[in-house]
Amino acid sequence: MGQSLVLAIHLFLAGRNGSGEPPARPVRNPGRLVWFHCAADTSMTSLGHLATLLKAQARDVSVLVTTDSQSGQRAAQLPKDVICDAAPPEQGQAAARFLDHWRPDLMVLFGSSLPAVSLVEAHRRGVPVLLANALKPDTGWITRLFRRGMTRSLLGRLKGIMAQDAEAVRWYLALGRGLPPVDMTGRIEETAAPLTCSEAERSALAEVLSARPIWLAIACPEPEEDAVLAAHQGAMRFAHRLLLILAPANPARGDALAAKITAKGWAVARRSLDEDPAPETQVFLADGEAEAGLWYRLAPVCYIGGTLTGVGGCPNPFEAAALGSAIIHGPDSGAYPRAFARLKAASATRPITSPDELPEAVDALTAPDRAALLAHNAWATSSGGAEVAARVVDRILAEITPVKDGTV
């Protein structure tokens, strides 16, 4: 491949730096390792979902994540089994030490990040490199890479480019010969794998509740409990058989919540006591082990707890979307601002701005046609992101799976 003069100068200068003390790094696990490196604006939630999908299909694979701007807050959004480390600086010795330690089987760059020194060093060692979620670069990106020739020289070291859209495909192809294959996989978006549950439990409870309208308040923090109960009281005026499944953010609140509900003169059943809701039960307190996948499947409408007060964070809304539950949420999006924004843009949620609006929202969505429309839009948005994630994972697996006797 052609070597850009600007790239050669950049690598020469980088080789003269980086003789400082190497940082302490986490221990490398046995087996294969895939290194995800991403731009500072990349969604950690989407990377975490990719890592989960990848590890589900290749259990011996570890996933390492570095970013252009590493922070503990961003790392906290990743699954616990994903390794986080500081990216090596653009210095030759630092990149070499990083690769000596981690020995990745594959490097995957996401978005606009093209760390020249690490990319060139990985390529020199025979580590395949992919670029995913690639957009047509803006002027700022080209400026950071100094010149088009340097861009072409770096991209020529890749094994493949996965572009977000047709415009990006055209831009990369226009760079000329010597580039790797360019595929349009779509934009990697935040999504969530469908939560699991016991099918026997779901079937049994669905039969018990088959004739009742249901709504769910999931991960409800203590400061929002009164608002949720007030909304239920208001909605029951128009749907007297309405059942609230109330899943507190802290299951230890079960006793206090049950007392609060009973004081209203309502009938309550508790999951932690292995009680099933009876026909007269008005609140089913889901104060047992984490079973969000079960509750989303049973409730056609859900309120995402924590979004009115911001207390305790909130669940990923795509968990509800993937299982067909229409979403009500407040103004606080916790760790998932992009997810809520995407769903809102797709007319896939019922946003509210204050607790006073919750009763009306619940009442409106007890109409099955309205709830079904929101749930469909949310599911379509969620499934589109899941398809892109699956294509990217398939490409990664194709690169790290050895070929034997003409078969994979």
Image (spheres, helix red, strand yellow):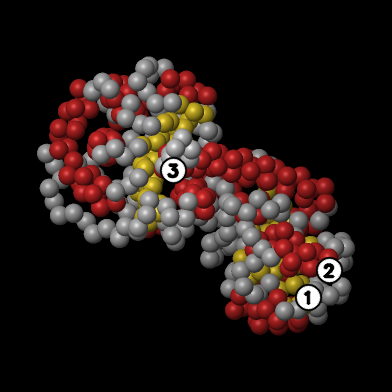
Residue bearing mark 3: 401
Instruction: Calculate the distance from the C-alpha at mark 2 to the C-alpha at mark 1.
Output: 8 Å
* 58 lies above or below 106: below
Q: Residue 212, how many percent across, how many down?
A: 85, 63
Q: Are marks 1 and 3 in contact (CB under 8 Å)?
A: no
Residue on which the image places disc 1: 276
**Above or below for 246 versus 47:** below
Residue at 73% across, 68% down: 201
Q: Position of residue 246 (x, y in %)?
A: 70, 69
Image quadrant for the N terminus?
Answer: top left
Amino acid carrying mark 2 in the image: Val
Give the residue at x 79% y 68%.
204
Q: Is residue 311 left or right of residue 264?
A: left
Determine crowd level at label 1: few under 14, some 14-19, many 20+ residues with C-alpha closer than 10 A.
some
The answer to which quarter of the image holds residue 221 is: bottom right
Q: Secondary structure at mark 3?
A: loop
Q: Residue at x 32, y 57 (%)?
A: 28
Q: Look at mark 2 in the image and give the residue it sits on.
A: 208
Task: Return the residue nearer the eye: 315 or 206.
Answer: 206
Position in image of residue 33 (x %, y %): 37, 50
